[in-house]
Amino acid sequence: MIDTHVHLYDSAFDPDRDQVVERAKKAGITHCILPAIDKSTYGAMQECLETYPGFCYKASGLHPTSVNADYNLELGFAYSKMTDAVAIGEIGLDFYRSREYTGEQISAFEQQLEWARDLDLPVIIHSRSAFPELLASLKKCAFPGMRGVLHAWSGSREVFDQAGRYGDFFMGIGGVVTLKNARLGEIVRKTGLDRIVLETDAPWLTPVPYRGKRNESSYLSYIAQKIALLKDISPDQVIGQTTENALSLFFGK
Ligand SMILES: [Zn+2]
């Protein structure tokens, strides 16, 4: 399995990061993609990359909730860290708590989509309470070869399909699918496995049965199991296809 979205460098893992990685490997995780948030995350991320080579892979980018009046400085920094990145992320639009920097968020997002074109990299997109704007930016910046993950998908199937007109996008499914959330369950049930990748977003978005505790990559199997249940297929089928999807998206395999 590939955890396509985990903040392993977060301080929540400082006390026992080695054990967390050991448990993940034992649970069958072979690769982890570590998305950046802003400047403050790169030091700890670099340490993870060096400590767990061949297991942790880097994404570089500026998270929408870290976009403010100084976003150009942050963008320059994210771009300078693009060496060895397997993706640009996480990037996107988030107007859930505030619309204060709407214009700045859109500019930063579109700038990073242009990098994806220039560097031929997939994108990891965070999108919350911003679906019309998301589609507008994707449409504006679309290019042949645009591809990525719509991470922690919380939109409708219709919006997901519309995004698919502009690029080759996968739906990032994590712990939220294990909750009693009929709407997401229905979306996952109706979405082809060839469009889904697994992610934890650890240390956040913990799946059942560990709600209320810190999330970690080894719990990815609970997400695979829930998807299998929803689709009435075996967990091995879910794991096989989603791993293939992630390998092709991030590693060109
Ligand atoms: Zn994240």
Image (spheres, rainbow, N blue to C red):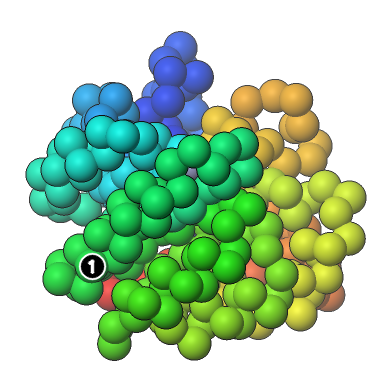
In front of the other: 44 or 217: 44
Does the image show residue 237?
no
Give the image location of residue 175, x and y in percent: 69, 47
Is residue 178 left or right of 166 when viewed as pictured?
Answer: right
Give the image location of residue 8, x and y in percent: 42, 33
SS type, badge 1: helix
Give the image location of residue 80, x and y in percent: 10, 44
Q: Which residue is pictured at 43% across the width and 54% down the height?
A: 92
Does the image show residue 18?
yes
Q: Which residue is pictured at 63% across the width and 26% down the height?
A: 214
Q: Which residue is pictured at 20% across the width and 63% down the height?
A: 115
Is residue 165 left or right of 112 when viewed as pictured?
Answer: right
Compared to 99, does 28 lie above or below?
below
Q: Is mark 1 within 8 Å of ligand 1?
A: no
In front of the other: 9 or 55: 9
Residue type at mark 1: give it.
Answer: Glu
Give the image location of residue 224, x and y in percent: 67, 59
Compared to 215, does 237 lie above or below?
below
Q: What is the crowding at mark 1: few (fewer than 14 residues within 10 Å), some, or many (at least 20)?
A: some
Compared to 253, does 39 lie above or below?
above
In front of the other: 84 or 140: 140
Is residue 150 left or right of 223 when viewed as pictured?
Answer: left
Task: Identify the residue position indicated by label 1 in the image.
Answer: 114
Res. 192 image quadrant: bottom right
Q: Residue furthest top?
A: 15
Q: Which residue is pictured at 68% across the width and 37% down the height?
A: 206
Q: Quarter of the image containing the C terminus?
A: bottom left
